[in-house]
Image (cartoon, grey):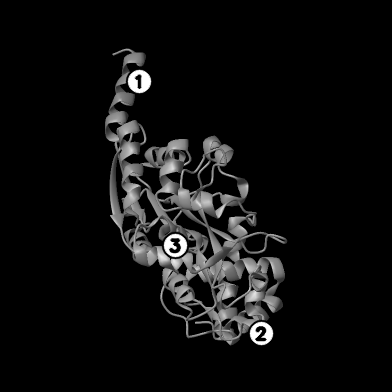
Amino acid sequence: MSKRILVTAILSSLAAASPAFAADTELNIYSARHYQTDEALYGEFTKQTGIKINRIEAKEDELLERIRNEGANSPGDVFITVDASRLAHADRQGVFAPVKSAVLEERIPAHLRTSNWFSYSTRARIIVYNPELVKAEQVQTYEQLADPALKGKFCSRSGSHPYNLSLGAAMIEHNGIDKTEAWAKGLVDNFARAPKGGDTDQIKAVAAGECGVAIANSYYLARLMNSDKTADKKVVDSIEAVWPNQQSWGTHVNVSGAGMLKHAPNKGAAVKFLEYLASDQAQAYFANGNNEWPVVSSVKVANPALEKLGEFKADTLPIGKLADSVAEAQRIFDRAGYR
């Protein structure tokens, strides 16, 4: 047998035996993002690439425990979740592998990605208020929510929820630890009731006059605005929304994001999927499906509620830096009694 034929035979054998030489035909996704509208997102990827997606959905803590327990034998290729603090927590657990991709670096703004995970859509933390109970000029910034003039008028979900912790982390980065602690204590002093429920519950409580002002992720309000239900329309008609901190650092934004898992058996497919999520088509699915904004600025959103809410100045604090302060935000909130 000639040397050339021998080498060809060896390479052919390796290609058949080793996934490193074979084209990936499957992708295993662990997802803590539970939106039915994402089905079209996954289906289009398979249509474009021929790569079959196997998906396991659960809460992020359950998925992370599973990934850790599986170790080097984990079949997981990609982990998807919402909230910067959750993505950072996963990163600290050492589950992600770094990804170098010219496509991702070109399309995703630097402040919305790290070396290990990437943001694909954003949502804003807005202020909603009841104009019969609170004046607009009283609630133009997050800082004003701690003003004694709003005593007994502030509603919130738990301070330990990642959405509020991420906002607390942003306050630390912009205003420092001492001012953020004073702010958190002011929020607690202004509670209309003990924290409970989710963001939609806060919006409804403001509409009902149970409280005068609350904070909520923008997509919860957009859902109500896009609803055909009479009760939801009544809620929307009873409140006003504010893009906070437009004269300073901008409205706090959070993200949905994903990263490739360290022991991914289908690394090629994983990178293809992460790059696909930054494509124009996927960005439209990813964002419009849950009333969010795409991270790729050239992609336009076709969403009546978001169009009605209008444009705003968003905080451009690097998402990785934001995640670094979440643990400190939790300690501050605990000391303030914001639970």
* Residue highlighted by disc 3: 220
Q: How many labels does the image show?
A: 3
- Kind of residue at badge 3: Tyr
Residue 22 appears in the rendering: no
Query: In the image, 23: left or right of 316?
Result: left
- Kind of residue at badge 2: Pro
Q: In which quarter of the image is residue 145?
A: bottom right
In this rendering, the answer to whether 266 lies above or below 141 is: above
Q: Quadrant of residue 244?
A: bottom right
Viewer-nearest residue: 304 or 44: 304
x, y percent for residue 281: 43, 37
> Which of the two labelled residues, at mark 1 and mark 2, occupies the earlier sequence position?
1
Gap between marks 1 and 3 measured at Cα = 60 Å
Alpha-carbon neighbours of circle 2 within 10 Å: few (<14), some, or many (≥20)? few
Q: Looking at the image, is mark 1 or mark 3 nearer the viewer?
A: 3
**Residue visible at 59% across and 81% down?**
187
> Which of the two labelled residues, at mark 2 and mark 3, occupies the earlier sequence position?
2
* Residue highlighted by disc 1: 7
* SS of the residue under disc 2: helix
> Which of the two labelled residues, at mark 1 and mark 3, occupies the earlier sequence position?
1
Q: Do the residues labelled 1 and 2 touch (CB within 8 Å)?
A: no
- Residue 148: assigned label: 2
